[in-house]
Image: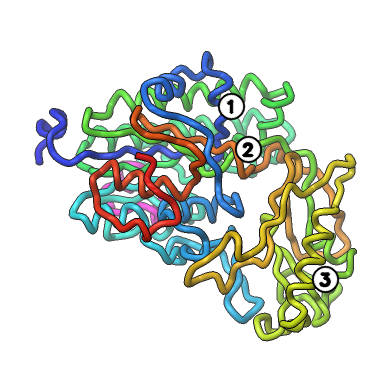
Amino acid sequence: MGLFDRLRGDGDPRVAFIGVDGVPYSLLSENEELFPNFAALADDGTANEISSIVPPESSACWPSLTTGMNPGETGVYGFQDREVGTYDTYVPMGREVQADRVWDRVQEAGRRATVMNVPVTFPPQRNVQRMVSGFLSPGLDKAAYPDDVRDYLETLDYRIDVNPKLGHQEEKAEFIEDAHATVDARFEAFKHYIEEDDWDLFFGVFMTTDRVNHFLFKDYERDGEYKDEFLEFYQKIDDYIGRLRELLPEDVTMIVASDHGFTSLDYEVHFNEWLREEGWLSFATDEPEELGDIADDTKAYSFIPGRFYINLEGREPRGSVPEEEYDEVRDQLKADLEALEGPNGNTVVDRVVEKEAAFRGDHDDIAPDLVVIPNNGFDLKSGFKADSEIFTTGPRNGMHSFDNTSLYIDDADVTIDDADLFDITPTILELMDIEYSRGDFDGASLV
């Protein structure tokens, strides 16, 4: 099929998905005068708030968004997971995602997919038209396929991610400058390959939005020092979304979505320290550094963000909780978590989700037994160090939220009611007229 045929709208329908990592729907919908391109996308098509997943952490969210399946099927629960039957941990990468991605299904249908900067996709797949891996990639030289993609991106000073260490500085000007440079190069790359017009699915992610939110979101919500700079950055994102939309031929439906929402952060909550002080966890060494340093009498431990594991006999190597006591112990831990209050007197926990309510699939054997969804203002941490503080503050002033996730689809016939991340992959396939079975996904098409 030639370029002229595509521009006429002949042939199979296509989709351009643009991810805006961590962008809350309220930010865009409550400031339409500042973000006219998002407003136009909503007016011409359909837009609404959707739900993220449990837990709402990018390393788990993007595998679920791009497969339509829960972490029990993808095998990825967060930035850190544990090996079955051991206390060994690892950082999940692209090869740990055990379910088919939406672009795999597109390629299997004889169509072509360009995939750029999606988190948890390193190393880049060789079975797609072109791919640039995103977050967790070690560098552009190993993240781009084929080689001509890498060569072109090097001319743009393309970078996989903003330098988050700059956000830890009290003065944020250098961080903000780096964020603009990162997103500028990302836009130029997206523009270039969209204009190539040789793909059926274009799937690209702006992750810099998440980085900016982590360090500046409270400035936006509570009129802080960098509120104007925050809004200026998002006006640039809005402009880039509008310019990309203008480039798309008539046979392409544009989708713009985030993977979770965002809110202001008041306190970081170090849950392994809380577990230690409450008698749930103890260490076998005076200077613990990792999960393997826990003592035999430990009843529970935690991973970010808010994932809790019972130290169960027969499942953990040094499990101390007999299987017949599992329900009782888990119920007590859940009750203790629900009662926890922060330094400001606010309840830390919005709700505690039990394993069987959130996870199902071939890889639920490493699923957490409980997941905490926090109230706004509390960011959940889980380092393995003794004698730290439970509640601390740091350089970050924004945190992920389960609700307030954004979804915009440039199609007025789409219905976005009670939707979540799992609905996005089947919606893309439906818009592209690619067949699938309803039972393939935890979500359903919104078309």
Asked if 12 appears above or below 35 in the picture, the reply is: below
Numbered marks: total = 3
Horizontal and vertical percent position of residue 172: 67, 31
Residue 388 or residue 42, whichever sits in front: 42
The CA span between labels 1 and 2 is 9 Å
Q: Quadrant of residue 375?
A: top right
Badge 1: residue crowd in 10 Å (few <14, some 14–19, many ≥20)? some
Rendered position, 11 above or below 309: above
Q: Are marks 1 and 2 in contact (CB under 8 Å)?
A: yes
Residue for point 40% across, 57% down: 441
Please give the name of the residue rendered at 66% of the width and 77% of the height, measured from the top-left corner: 87
The residue labelled by disc 1 is 27
Q: Which mark is first along the chain, 2 or 1?
A: 1
Label 2 crowd bin: few (<14), some (14–19), many (20+), radius 10 Å: many
Is residue 368 depicted above or below 420 in this figure?
Answer: below
In this rendering, position of residue 89 left or right of residue 378: left
Q: Which residues are magenta?
A: 140-153
Q: Secondary structure at mark 2?
A: strand
Q: Position of residue 428 (x, y in %)?
A: 33, 44
Say if mark 2 contacts mark 3, CB within 8 Å: no
Gap between marks 3 and 1 measured at Cα? 40 Å
Q: Which residue was labeled with disc 2? A: 262
Q: Earlier in the sequence, mark 2 or mark 3?
A: 2
**Which comes sooner in the sequence, label 3 or label 1?**
1
